Image: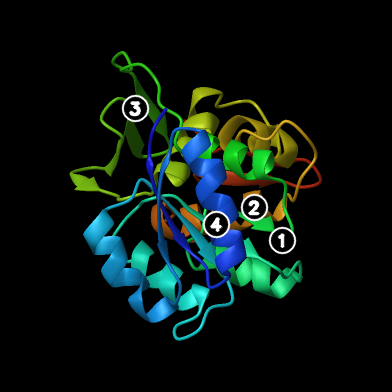
Amino acid sequence: MKGRVLVVDDDPALAEMLGIVLRSEGFEPYFVFDGDQALERFHEIRPDIVLLDLMLPGKDGIEVCRAVRAESGVPIVMLTAKGDTVDVVVGLESGADDYVVKPFKPKELVARVRARLRRTEPAEAELLTIGDLTIDVPAHSVTRGDTEIPLTPLEFDLLVALARKPRHVFTREALLEQVWGYRHVSDTRLVNVHVQRLRSKIERDTECPEVVVTVRGIGYKAGPV
């Protein structure tokens, strides 16, 4: 698997380490060291994934994340020295798909990158429904009537996972493994924040969700089919 990786981080030592690790795994890393130049570099490189530090000179990582997400569904993994709940949640709400707290193990980061860049064989025709939504899996499209609803790849994967088992209640840990590719216990806030983001796009009323339904004390399931 190869992919163009844009690393936005102001730590030269970390950038050097990431360059070595990513190249050894077959990726093509590119670097930018402040937030003010990040979007321009993003346009130049058109990366397959962005590794984005939360704390940056110039525009901070939250601003950069929002700017990238406003025009692209490219996967974004935050690199943060902060494990604070507020910082992590704000980053995820801004559009990041995942995050890694520094210091991290190179193999862990590569696993996250591979999970976000995973490639599958061309999918066979598959149409799914949740409520009044139609999901065309190989076309990666979600429609309500004649209106298409744009989702990021991760949001789409989350919706498909629920739609394929309409009567199944997924724990947050099960969704982490199936959608994010985790093989160990991790932060279930990832699931909660992405469900909120998904609902903001697909629910008629986010206060009374009918597509992605919460099952108190367990997790989530698809709404009525």
Amino acid, disc 3: Val
Bin the neighbour count of mark 1 within 10 Å (Cα to Cα): few under 14, some 14-19, many 20 and up.
few
Mark 3 vs mark 2: give the one in front: 2
Check disc 1 and give the amino acid type: Lys
| Disc 4 target residue | 16
Location of residue 29 in the rendering, given as x and y in whole percent from the top left corner: 42, 49
Q: Determine the secondary structure under disc 4.
A: helix
- Give the residue displayed 30% in from the left and 50% down from the top: 150
**Which of the labelled discs sits on residue 137, or is there none?**
3
Q: Nearer the viewer, residue 118 or 137?
A: 118
**Residue positioned most to the top:** 124
Tell me which amino acid carries mark 2: Leu
Label ID, residue 102: 1
Disc nearer the start of the sequence (4/3): 4
Position of residue 92 relative to residue 145, above or below, is below
1 or 2: tag closer to the N-terminus:
1
Number of marks? 4
Q: Nearer the viewer, mark 3 or mark 1?
A: 1
Q: Is residue 91 left or right of residue 104?
A: left
Q: Which numbered circle lies on residue 30?
A: none
Q: CA distance from mark 4 to mark 2?
A: 28 Å
At horizontal 37% and vertical 63% (from top left) the residue drawn is 69
* Upstream in sequence: badge 3 or badge 2: 3
Helix, strand or loop for disc 1: loop
The answer to whether residue 125 is above or below residue 93 is above
For the point 34% across and 32% down, the residue is 135
Say which mark, if any, is on residue 190: 2
Q: Nearer the viewer, mark 4 or mark 1?
A: 4
